[in-house]
Image: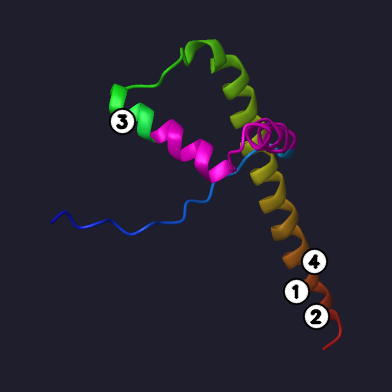
Amino acid sequence: MQKQSADIKITINLDRELKDKAKIIFNSIGLTMTDAISIFLRKAVEQNGILFSVCDFKDEFDEYRTNEVTRTIKYAVEKDTAEKKEKRLSYCTL
């Protein structure tokens, strides 16, 4: 008897507009986002590859990753700046 593997949870970062548009498409054909991603992964494993050319999306993906890195760096700098400012203010009130 084959042992079933446990389900796992995967967290991904997506552009909100992309997620919303994909959800509308999947819902219109009776799929959840989880169903659609599971189908994609099963087919990729079955075919031992991705079912479409990734090269077509390279520029778009590069731009997305660049924007994501920029947002992450900006957040880190803003957080660091706020923490330093807070420390300076706490020294002033001593």
Residue 22 belongs to magenta span: yes
Crowdedness near tag 3: few (<14), some (14–19) or many (≥20) residues, C-alpha within 10 Å: few
Q: Which of 14 and 80 is in front in this view?
A: 14
Q: Give the range drawn in magenta.
A: 17-41
Residue 91 belongs to magenta span: no
Label 4, label 2: how far apart the Cα atoms are: 9 Å
Left or right, residue 17 beside residue 1:
right
Q: In which quarter of the image is the C terminus?
A: bottom right
Disc 1 on helix, strand or loop?
helix
Q: Is the residue under label 3 in contact with that under label 1 (CB below 8 Å)?
A: no
Quadrant in the rendering for residue 24: top right
Crowdedness near tag 1: few (<14), some (14–19) or many (≥20) residues, C-alpha within 10 Å: few
Q: Position of residue 46 (x, y in %)?
A: 29, 27
Q: Nearer the viewer, residue 58 or 87?
A: 58
Magenta span: chief secondary structure: helix
Q: Is the residue under label 2 in contact with that under label 1 (CB below 8 Å)?
A: yes
Label 3, label 2: how far apart the Cα atoms are: 56 Å
Label 1, label 4: how far apart the Cα atoms are: 5 Å
Disc 4 on helix, strand or loop?
helix
Give the vertical position of 1 relative to 73 (above or below): below
Q: Which amino acid does label 1 sit on?
A: Lys
* Location of mark 1 (residue): 87
